Amino acid sequence: MRCLLVLIVSFYLQFIGALPAPDPRPSNDLVRKDSLPTSFQWSSSGPLIAPKSDSYNIAGIKDPSIVYHGDKYHVFASTAKASGYNLVYLSFSDFSQAASAEFHYLDQTPIGTGYRAAPQVFYFAPQKLWYLVYQNGNAAYSTNPDINNPAGWSAPKNFYSSMPSIIEQNIGDGNWVDMWVICDASNCHLFSSDDNGHLYRSQTSVANFPNGMGNTVIALQDSDRYALFEAANVYSTGDGKYLLLIEAIGSDEARYFRSWTSTSLAGSWAGLADTEANPFARSNNVKFDGNAWTESISHGEMVRSQVDQTMTISPCNLRYLYQGMDPNASDDYNALPWKLGLLTQTNSAC
């Protein structure tokens, strides 16, 4: 009876706010250990977000990063045109509103003009700050205490004083691109690609982040540069495992994603759905409503409601915001008409 009374009082105090509210995230013991399938099936929306007819006159919108926070979706993306790249922010409460969402061009903020591309957004809980990670020729970041305020981003700072030597030694004629940060309990890890068959990983302690990024190693490599090209995403699936996605260029020259899993951010990485025949996401496992508006499933990010630096996703009923384009389009790479669409998993094992 005494135990029962203690429980009743505890619940009552929690209800009136005397105790911390329970963590709203799903408990790991509610997630099936086999919830990631070994093959994937998807349905795709049509284009949801496209360049607007405005003074910026961009050709494509690319490389989206997305979080769901405060009852709305926040999307950061690259703006692309022949003269170069920068970043844009938009928000909406439902994907049906995405096409009409206002564009906030981040070159009008302290992020500034010049080359900025491939953003990743997350909330770094230890500092109570939002981080926007992007490439600017180096690996850069800006911070903001309020994701709702596009003018609040700080001026760029770089993670590295210069390109790490191991990247210089292996990049060949590739490009250092697509930075991605994810943290475990002890360390923050920065992944990047070189368009030459290498995935790199650096790290610093959570306490020292964003400073001290070093110990750069090759995390994964392939002798075929197009099989391990760019746009790496890494997520915690909340069950002691990590999911790695990397964009490849297929035998049909269309973009697609391969996938791997690991029990540690330090690797090693085991193939999950990692071939053209059995990809994570490719034209052969995506069904469209009506005509397929794209043959490429390219640079994107999982829709996340868990916003912090652990990049935790539920492995159930995945949704992935990606870039695609008219397969008949042809132009210089920077001037291609990329748009954003949404994949929804149709074979969840949960």
Image (tube, grey):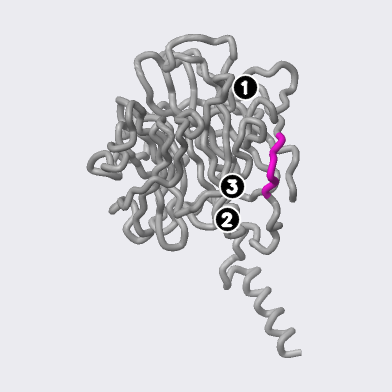
**Disc sitting over residue 241 in the figure:** 2
Residue 188 lies in what quarter of the image?
bottom left
Q: Is residue 231 above or below residue 207?
A: above
Q: Taken as a whole, is the magenta stretch helix, strand or loop?
A: loop
Marked residue nearer the N-terminal end (2 or 3): 2
Count the numbered circles shown.
Answer: 3
Disc 2 to disc 3, how far (Cα)?
18 Å
Mark 2 or 1: in front is 2
As helix, strand or loop, the secondary structure at mark 1 comes to loop
For label 3, the residue is: 305
- Lateral position of residue 83 relative to residue 42, left or right: left
Chain part drawn in magenta: 36-41
Mark 2 or 3: in front is 2
* Residue drawn at point x = 30 percent, y = 43 percent: 166
Q: Amino acid at mark 3?
A: Ser
* Residue drawn at point x = 54 percent, y = 40 percent: 245
For label 1, the residue is: 47
